[in-house]
Image (cartoon, coloured by chain):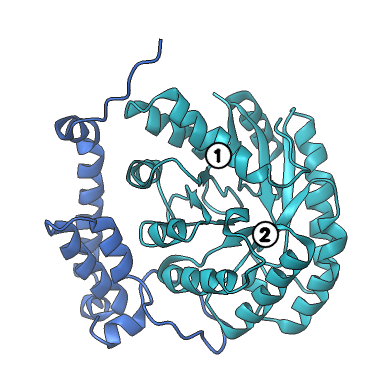
Chain colours: A blue, B cyan
């Protein structure tokens, strides 16, 4: 006999995922602390990747829906023109153009 | 349970991994042609690689009762070199004719450059000329949204390419909706650091449904896990989803997409 599907309730999701996500949050806090306590912290904090990270963290804390998509968009190249050349380029996880344009 | 991994790079894995796949319930895999971790120096290197994909790996897999299929194409990372690209594209038909080659892939964009687009255009035309299935690689990280949109526009502007015969891979939360709306299949990749986790993949299943979705490990030479597809199925199970839905996502869906090539048979 097939058991009918019953989606998890939100408190069950909290029970199931709290500990592992607490650990992830501690990793993020530790990452930011590590930057702060080492030489060059100010330079690192002004880097476009750090800036995208901070904006993304704010999006995670917002009460808006689709936080995951919001983080993805905050780190994305939103232009549409192809690059003239890809030689020597690789993805780094955030878009420098977005920072320059204040997006 | 039975599962198919529709995107795994077995040339980069040990023979032990074939044994792990077999005893865990993955008896069918498909392996797209990809970037080897370094740029190859000549078209002859690609000949050797396509031989490995169409002869060596099917034989290695068969020792463990696994059916190995492949995709043939020039990856976008090496497409910046137009002279090499021209030579490699010239040999693709010879390997696409082989009995385990399912179509053209993984082809697409990497940094969304003009040369990458030129080479993708030529491979899309080859797919039209030969009525081949397409497995599309979308760019990584910050380049994914832009690249996915450029690729979809290119495909949709060619009326002879049917989106139901195209799988757009490495989709994530910000691209899934647009891909699915246009009628394409989409792939989610379980890659620990740069792509998705089992939890996020099953979130996507819950948000976007079980239609036209395939989940893969893309296990290769980097940090990756050839059993991640089964771990993701287990994530779906622990949330209480019924076995028939789990079977659809991890077995029936990849079977349905890949079966559009008559050479495909499940193991």
Tell me the quadrant of the picture where the N terminus of chain B can be found: top right
Q: Name the disc covering residue B253, or none.
A: 1
Mark 2 or 1: in front is 1
Q: What crowding class fits label 1: few (fewer than 14 Cα within 10 Å), some (14-19), or many (20 or more)? A: many
* Res B82 → quadrant: bottom right
What residue is shown at x 54% (from left), y 45% (from top)? B217
Residue sitting nearer the eye, B126 or B161:
B161
The spot of residue B4 in percent (x, y) is: 60, 36
Please tell me which of labels 2 and 1 falls first in the chain.
2
Residue sitting nearer the eye, A27 or B228:
B228
Q: Secondary structure at mark 1?
A: helix
The chain ID associated with circle 2 is B
Residue sitting nearer the eye, B3 or B226:
B3
Q: Is residue A53 visible?
A: yes
The spot of residue B204 in percent (x, y) is: 37, 47
The answer to whether tags 2 and 1 share a subunit is yes
Q: Is residue B227 visible?
A: no
Q: Name the disc covering residue B105, or none.
A: 2
What residue is shown at x 20% (from left), y 70% (from top)? A55
């Amino acid at each position: 006999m097939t058991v009918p599907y019953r989606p998890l309730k939100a408190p069950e999701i909290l029970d199931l995922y709290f500990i592992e996500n607490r650990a992830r949050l501690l990793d993020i806090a530790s990452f930011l602390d590590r930057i702060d306590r080492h030489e060059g912290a100010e330079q690192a904090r002004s880097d476009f990747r750090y800036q995208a990270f901070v904006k993304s963290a704010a999006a995670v804390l917002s009460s808006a829906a689709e936080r995951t998509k919001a983080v993805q968009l905050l780190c994305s190249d939103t232009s549409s023109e192809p690059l003239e050349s890809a030689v020597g380029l690789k993805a780094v996880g955030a878009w420098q153009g977005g920072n320059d344009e204040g997006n | 349970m039975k599962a198919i991994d529709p995107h795994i790079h077995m040339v980069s894995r040990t023979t032990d991994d074939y044994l792990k796949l077999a005893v865990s319930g993955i008896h069918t895999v498909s392996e797209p042609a990809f970037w080897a971790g370094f740029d190859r120096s000549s078209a002859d290197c690609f000949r050797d690689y396509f031989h490995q994909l169409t002869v060596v790996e099917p034989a290695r897999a068969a020792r463990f009762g696994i059916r190995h299929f492949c995709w043939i194409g020039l990856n976008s990372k090496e497409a910046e070199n137009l002279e090499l690209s021209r030579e490699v594209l010239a040999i693709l038909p010879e390997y696409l004719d082989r009995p385990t080659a399912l179509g053209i892939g993984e082809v697409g964009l990497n940094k969304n450059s003009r040369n990458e687009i030129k080479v993708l255009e030529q491979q899309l035309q080859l797919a039209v000329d030969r009525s081949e299935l397409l497995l599309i690689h979308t760019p990584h990280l910050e380049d994914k949204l832009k690249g996915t949109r450029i690729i979809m526009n290119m495909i949709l502007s060619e009326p002879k390419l049917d989106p139901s015969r195209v799988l757009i891979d490495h989709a994530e939360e910000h691209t899934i909706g647009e891909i699915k709306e246009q009628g394409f299949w989409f792939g989610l990749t379980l890659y620990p650091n740069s792509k998705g986790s089992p939890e996020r993949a099953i979130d996507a299943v819950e948000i976007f449904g079980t239609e036209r979705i395939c989940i893969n490990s893309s296990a290769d030479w980097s940090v990756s896990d050839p059993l991640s597809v089964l771990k993701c199925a287990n994530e779906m199970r622990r949330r209480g989803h019924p076995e028939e839905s789990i079977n659809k996502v991890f077995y029936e869906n990849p079977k349905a997409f890949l079966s559009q090539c008559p050479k495909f048979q499940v193991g």
